[in-house]
Amino acid sequence: MRVIDRLFKSDEPSVRFKVLVNVLGKELGSAPIKKLQKEIKTSPRVRSLLSERDRNREIPYHPYAKWYGAHWVLADLADIGYPSGDESLLPLREQVYKWLLSKRHEKSIRSIEGRVRRCASQEANAVYYLHTLGLADARTDELAERLMKWQ
């Protein structure tokens, strides 16, 4: 059996999604992809990722808590093909913005001889998953502007 055939038989819908989109080039808006995204949304993996949410739909840890804070959960959801536009994720988005746009976070960004010394993965991942998950707003643009300014 070919590897691609084995991947198509995976119980994990995100594996089938990745093959269709990233290997075979299926369009994100196509019917088979939308069907898979519905499966992804209700999959055991997603239920596990979102299982820590409290009654306010927030994850009660620092957003960057490895690997279960809101930042990582949203990054994982975007990566596995979770459907765009789910408003139930807005509280997680707000946790990320509260962290990345805070004075405390801003103070952690160091400059040496006028050049920013920063691993930009936190802000860059946030821009990626907020756009991918359909959760971006003007604050996402602010994160992108910071990234460009730091270059």
Image: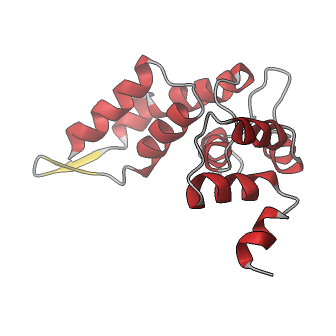
Residue 129: x, y in percent? 54, 39
**Residue farthest along the bottom direction in this orientation:** 1
- Using the image, determine if residue 135 lies above or below residue 20: above
Q: Is residue 149 above or below residue 44?
A: above
Colour treatment of the image: secondary structure
Can residue 120 be seen by looking at this rendering?
Answer: yes
Q: Is residue 42 left or right of residue 144?
A: right
Q: What residue is at 38 percent from the left and 32 percent from the top?
A: 143
Say which quadrant the N terminus sits in: bottom right
Q: Nearer the viewer, residue 30 or 58?
A: 30
145 on left or right of 62: left
Residue 83, located in which quarter of the rendered image? top right
In the rendered image, residue 70, in percent from the top left (x then y), is placed at 66, 39
Total count of labels: 0
Residue drawn at x 77%, y 43% as measured from the top left: 36
Where does the image place residue 105, in percent across and percent down from the top left? Answer: 43, 37
Whether residue 52 can be seen here: no
Could you tell me which residue is drawn at 66 percent across and 29 percent down? 92
User: Picture coordinates of residue 125 (x, y %)?
Assistant: 48, 45
Q: Is residue 91 left or right of residue 55?
A: left
The residue lying toward the viewer, choosing from 121 and 54, is: 121
Front residue of 63/78: it is 78
Looking at the picture, tell me which residue is in the foreground, 134 or 92.
Answer: 134
Q: Quadrant of residue 96?
A: top right
Q: For residue 10, what is the image quadrant?
A: bottom right
Residue at 30% over, 40% down = 147
